[in-house]
Image (cartoon, grey):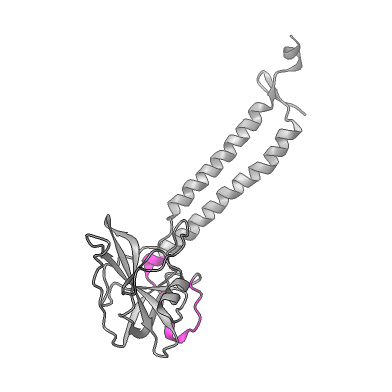
Amino acid sequence: MPLSFGARVFRPGWLPTLGLLLLLPLLIGLGVWQLDRAAQKRELFEQFEADAGAALSINRVHEIDASALRYSNASVTGRYDGAHQFLLDSMTHAGRVGYHVLTPLRLPDARRHVIVNRGWVPAGVTRDDLPDVPVEANLRELGGRIALPPRPGIRLEQTPADGDGWPQVVFYPTIETLETRLGYPLDNYFLLLAPREPDGFVREWRPDVPGPARHIGYAVQWFALALALLIIYVVVNLEKPDADRRA
């Protein structure tokens, strides 16, 4: 039954109605999904700030699900391989460009190695002026947070380092790339060295993921599109009464 809106009658056609039935649930679903993502990110940031929970002992666990345990507290005992370190390029702090110092840690069984991110150091005046990042190889117990290797928006092909010297500059490397250059296997995550630990650099760690506000913004956009679609559907299906059209 047609509905009257003032001087016009609402007569929806089948094609616009079909389009509405297909697109409206999709737009609303995308908005709800973004709200769910915002809730997940809020929980992640709250967990990071709380710094609660007992530390997982990496030495006692042979396989770690880094995605499930992301940013969890962890401890590990081992020796730094200070002769073979990496400088993660294009890392910024307080508006300055520099590197993150990635140092392999050899566990006592000598079959496992973990990459420890010892923090940020400033870049030199030139690209050839690399920072000096020595560290002793004494047995030590470290604390930190489990983290996934940082990933760029677009994965570029990794090029071999110039020469055979160390430390080597890398740009968003995969674990496989680091294993190839080191010549021994690595666990599939990084350990962000806790600020209280010695032999580190600037360590103001934050989750390297977009905050909840971005997802809320996306959700608002999807809901706005859904509302616009509904308004357009109503407007295009409003017709003048038959008597007015014949006049």
Residue 83's spot in the image, x, y percent? 31, 80
Asked if residue 56 can be seen in this view, the reply is no
**Left or right placement of residue 173 versus residue 29 in this view:** left
User: Magenta stretch: residue 150 in it?
Assistant: no
The quadrant in which the C terminus is found is: top right
Asked if residue 2 can be seen in this view, the reply is yes
Q: Name the residue nearer the viewer: 93 or 86.
A: 86
Residue 228's spot in the image, x, y percent? 58, 35
Which residue is located at x 49 percent, y 78 percent? 64
Residue 145's spot in the image, x, y percent? 39, 73
The quadrant in which the N terminus is found is: top right
Q: Residue furthest left?
A: 125
**Left or right placement of residue 13 versus residue 188 in this view:** right
The residue range painted magenta reads 47-66
Q: Residue furthest front?
A: 163
Q: Name the residue nearer the viewer: 244 or 157.
A: 157
Which residue is located at x 47 percent, y 75 percent? 188
Q: Name the residue nearer the viewer: 144 or 244.
A: 144
Residue 150's spot in the image, x, y percent? 42, 64
User: Magenta stretch: residue 54 in it?
Assistant: yes
**Left or right placement of residue 90 versus residue 24 in this view:** left
